Every structure is written in structure tokens, then in C-alpha cells.
């Protein structure tokens, strides 16, 4: 069976399961990801110029596509889309082949990832999507490349195929969430890791990893893992690597090893206990008026919803228009104006506080929005945003949670809030589910109330956790020094 680049990344046991369960269907989450990438691919290909001699290969039988690719290369086509190559045990589809002025071809892949980020002082060669196939020169632009293994493997495989034909240059390109440009980098750096991945044996047993969430074989693998009592049930991915080297490879062995907190969390997992009190933390700052904020972004494109709960009412600042333009800027400006009004109504700097749960996302989008929309009506300056972020009025509830609590499945809001007594109305909209719902909501108004309710629940759940934590997080077991949980005093 020929492998493709995506097969070489992440869980390799999946390749064994593909042979055992060939009829398995992709999960809804995997189908949504595929649909999202297909839509991005169509949008990007539509930006390509219509140049004489351009060849668009039909995405049909891979062998027929491979033959059509070779014919296009022989004809010296300036631009080829949906090219197909094969090698010893592998296949690769290349979204775009751009013919350089020296007669070589630059393979370019369309990715769901962010390919680069702006970085002053750095320079990266780029090709404009609208200029591909026209023989233009690369531009030098201020970005920093973000490497993703699957994209690198695709480019490395394409370069191998082109090298065998004497048509390879040193460069490959990735078009990410910005469809207007391909970011170029040398593909040589991917060749050694690719060779190692191709030569690596397929594992004989599963391990729990993050991608299990969207894998079609999760049920079958889960049964195997539970039968093995595998330690990855508690410590997924590489988190248990050092323990495995000590021959602690099951949950039972981890509990028996009495290694302190990690063993106690394993015991809690076995007993179905999601959260324990680990230590005495700092009291969370409170205020007369408390505001909870949660942001919903679509990948790296921008923010479509700033949600705010003021203790009595939920206020959504939302746009369903394309992100990155005036509509997103106006939404951010309206949110900021409302937030500033509430803060200024306080009798002092600590009379009103604003809370979120894990502020990485909120801080990123506050700063990014101020930078991207600088100068537009109502948009705060970057300095204003920074002053707010650094103030005592902006409180990250998660920082106080992790000081005091521990949990075998982590301390995310969806784990902690139910223990604090809060339940979501829309349980299916977590994580990737909200991304899929947003794509539908852009064109289907009926989907929009679900997203708003989900965001409201995130805001109100943050408030519930804060109140529960202030009350001493009653009703959860203590993480004891002896490795045995006991109920905390009410």
C-alpha cells in the first residue's frame, strides 16, 4: 500500500488499522476538516492566472493523474494544478507546479495551516498566487516561516519526483491561510526526516494521542488500550516516555509506583474523578462588578465574536461578514467601547474586574485586532490594549485554578466547570465543533443562535468556576500525600 505524506505524521498505528478496518468511515470532525481544506483549495486555485499552456489535471484515478502530470511536464507547461507523483511505496499530490525561469519546477502545496507570521526584521521569499506561471521573480517580505511536518513531507516527496526527472530546484512553497502568496523555503531540510519516517516500522500496539479525537479507529484502539491498561490512557503522547523507560507502562504500574502527584492522578482517573484539590492557592481577586469575556475566532483569520457576560446579561459583539475587513474592525470597536464604559463606571481601578479562562487567546486577539485595525473608528491603540492586559482589572481564572487544582484529563474549562456545577447547552460545539458551526453560520442564519449560546455558556462557566473557587472548591477529593483521595470538607 502506498503511503502519502499525511500518513507519515502523527499516529503510525493508524496505518495498521487502515488495513484491518478498510471500511471504516472518517469521523464527522475529520470530514469537516477535509471539507474546510477542499474549500480553501478551491478558493486558492481560483486566484491563479489563466496563462497559455496551463494544465489542470482532473482529480480522478491517481495513475491517470500521474501520467497526465508527466505529459504536462514534457510540454513545459508554465503552470500545472493537481499534479500527481509516485515513488517507491509512496504517492504525493501537489496542488501547484510553477515553472521557474531556469526550467525547473517549484512544487507548491495548499495547507490548512498558517504558513507564516509577520515578523519585522526577517525576510522570506514569496511568490504571489496571482503571478504563478508568469515567470515572475520571488519577492522578499517580512515574515517568519511556520513549518508543519506534513507540508514539508509533501514538498520533499514532490522534490524527489522532480529530481528523478531532472526538473527540481531547491525551493518549495506553502500557501496557508493567506491564499494570496506562497511562502518559499528550501526543501532539503525535510529530506532526512522524510527518509526516517518512510523507513520507520509500523507500531504493533496503539497509544493514545491527541488525534484520537478525530480518528475513525478510536473505538477499536480504545478497546485495545483498556485491555492493555496502557499508560497513555492517563499520559497521552510522549508524556509517559521517561516512565516507559523505567518499565512503567500501565496505569496499574503507575499507581503502584507511588510517584506522588502523577500516581495519584492515575488513581483518580481510574476512579473517574476529574478534578482534585492539590494545594492551597492564592485567593482569586474579586470585585463589586464582575465581567466575563470569551472570544471566538475562525482559525487565524480573525475574530467573529467577542462575548461579554456582565453578571446579568449576555452581550455578543458579532459579525458574519468576511473577516479581516471593516466589519470585524467595527465589531472589535463596539466590544471595546462597551468594555471601557463598564470599567469607567467603577469607583476605582479594582471596583470592576474583567475575567477570562486562559488568557492566551484573548490576549492574542486583543493585540492583533488593535494592530490590524489601527486607525479605524473606535479601535483602541496597541498601547491602550497593552495597559489593559497588564492591569489588575484583567484576571485569568485559569491561573488560579491550576495553582489549586489538578486533574487527570487537564484543567480545561470544559473539565472544571461541570465540577463547579455548570453545564453547557451546546456540548457538541467545543473546539473544532465551533469552527465547523461558524462555517455553516456564515451562510445559514439558523445556525447562529447555537454559536451565541455556546459563547454565552463559556462566559457564564468562567463566572461559575470563579465563584466555586472562591468558596473553596467544595466537594472534590484532596490530593493526599499518601496517594489516597478523601472528600474535602464541605
Image (spheres, rainbow, N blue to C red):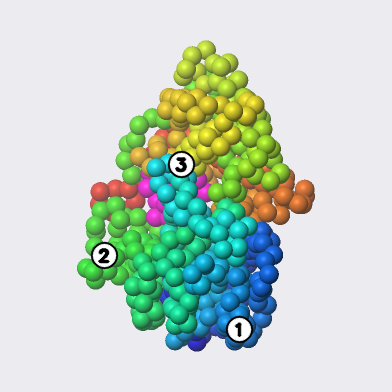
Residue at 29 percent of width and 65 percent of height? 241
In the drawing, what numbered circle is on residue 243?
A: 2
- Choose the circle earlier in sequence order: 3 or 2: 2
Which residue is nearer to you in this view: 349 or 444?
A: 444
Residue 18 picture location, percent across and down: 52, 81
Does residue 261 appear to the left or right of 139 in the view shown? left
Residue at 61 percent of width and 80 percent of height? 75
Q: Secondary structure at mark 1?
A: helix
In the drawing, what numbered circle is on residue 337?
A: none
Does residue 169 appear to the left or right of 22 in the view shown? left
Residue at 55 percent of width and 49 percent of height? 300
Query: In the image, which residues are magenta?
Result: 404-415
Which of the 4 quarters of the picture holds residue 250? bottom left
Q: Which residue is mark 3?
A: 360
Q: Residue furthest left?
A: 246
Nearer mark to the viewer, of 1 and 2: 1
Label 1 Cα neighbours within 10 Å, binned few <14 / some 14-19 / many ≥20: few
Q: Which residue is mark 1?
A: 71
Instruction: Measure how far apart labels 3 and 1 are at the Cα level.
Output: 50 Å
Does residue 315 appear to the left or right of 127 in the view shown? right
Q: Secondary structure at mark 3?
A: helix
Amino acid at each position: 500500500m502506498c503511503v502519502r505524506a499525511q500518513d507519515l505524521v502523527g499516529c503510525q498505528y493508524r496505518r495498521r488499522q487502515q488495513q484491518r478496518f478498510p471500511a471504516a468511515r472518517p469521523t464527522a470532525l475529520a470530514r469537516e476538516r477535509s471539507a474546510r481544506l477542499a474549500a480553501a483549495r478551491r478558493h486558492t486555485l481560483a486566484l491563479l492566472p489563466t496563462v497559455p499552456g496551463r494544465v489542470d489535471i482532473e482529480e480522478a484515478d491517481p495513475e491517470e493523474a500521474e501520467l497526465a502530470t508527466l505529459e504536462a511536464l514534457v510540454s513545459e507547461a508554465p503552470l500545472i494544478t493537481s499534479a500527481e507523483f509516485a515513488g517507491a511505496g509512496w504517492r504525493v499530490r501537489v496542488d501547484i507546479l510553477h515553472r521557474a525561469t531556469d526550467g525547473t519546477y517549484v512544487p507548491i502545496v495548499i495547507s490548512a495551516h498558517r504558513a507564516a507570521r509577520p515578523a519585522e526584521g526577517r525576510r522570506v521569499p514569496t511568490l504571489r498566487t496571482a503571478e504563478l506561471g508568469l515567470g515572475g521573480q520571488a519577492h522578499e517580505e517580512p515574515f517568519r516561516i511556520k513549518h508543519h511536518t506534513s507540508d514539508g513531507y509533501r514538498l520533499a516527496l514532490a522534490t524527489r519526483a522532480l529530481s528523478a526527472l531532472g526538473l527540481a530546484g531547491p525551493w518549495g512553497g506553502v500557501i496557508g491561510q493567506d491564499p494570496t502568496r506562497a511562502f518559499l523555503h528550501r526543501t532539503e531540510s525535510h529530506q532526512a526526516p522524510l527518509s526516517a519516517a518512510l523507513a520507520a516500522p509500523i507500531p504493533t500496539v496503539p497509544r493514545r494521542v491527541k488525534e484520537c479525537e478525530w480518528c475513525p479507529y478510536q473505538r477499536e484502539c480504545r478497546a485495545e488500550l483498556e485491555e492493555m491498561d496502557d499508560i497513555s490512557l492517563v499520559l497521552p503522547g510522549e508524556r509517559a516516555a521517561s516512565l516507559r523507560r523505567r518499565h512503567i507502562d500501565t496505569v496499574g504500574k503507575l499507581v503502584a509506583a507511588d510517584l506522588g502527584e502523577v500516581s495519584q492522578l492515575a488513581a483518580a482517573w481510574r476512579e473517574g474523578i476529574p478534578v482534585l484539590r492539590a494545594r492551597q492557592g492564592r485567593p482569586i481577586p474579586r470585585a463589586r462588578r464582575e465581567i466575563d469575556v470569551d472570544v471566538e475566532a475562525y482559525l487565524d483569520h480573525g475574530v467573529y465574536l467577542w462575548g461579554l457576560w456582565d453578571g446579568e446579561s449576555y452581550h455578543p459583539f458579532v459579525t458574519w461578514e468576511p473577516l479581516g475587513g471593516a466589519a470585524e474592525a467595527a465589531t472589535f470597536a463596539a466590544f471595546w467601547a462597551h468594555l471601557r464604559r463598564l470599567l469607567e463606571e467603577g469607583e476605582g481601578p479594582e471596583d470592576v474586574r474583567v475575567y477570562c479562562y486562559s488568557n492566551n487567546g484573548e490576549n492574542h486577539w486583543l493585540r492583533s485586532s488593535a494592530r490590524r485595525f489601527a486607525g479605524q473608528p473606535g479601535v483602541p491603540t496597541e498601547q491602550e490594549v497593552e495597559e489593559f492586559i497588564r492591569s489588575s482589572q484583567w484576571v485569568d481564572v485559569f491561573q488560579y485554578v491550576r495553582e489549586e487544582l489538578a486533574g487527570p484529563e487537564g484543567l480545561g474549562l470544559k473539565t472544571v466547570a461541570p465540577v463547579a456545577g455548570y453545564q453547557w447547552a451546546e456540548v457538541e460545539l467545543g473546539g473544532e465543533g465551533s469552527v465547523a458551526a461558524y462555517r455553516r453560520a456564515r451562510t445559514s442564519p439558523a445556525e447562529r443562535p447555537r454559536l451565541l449560546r455556546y459563547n454565552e455558556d463559556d462566559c457564564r462557566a468562567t463566572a461559575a468556576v470563579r465563584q466555586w473557587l472562591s468558596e473553596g472548591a467544595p466537594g472534590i477529593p484532596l490530593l493526599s500525600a499518601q496517594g489516597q483521595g478523601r472528600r474535602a470538607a464541605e
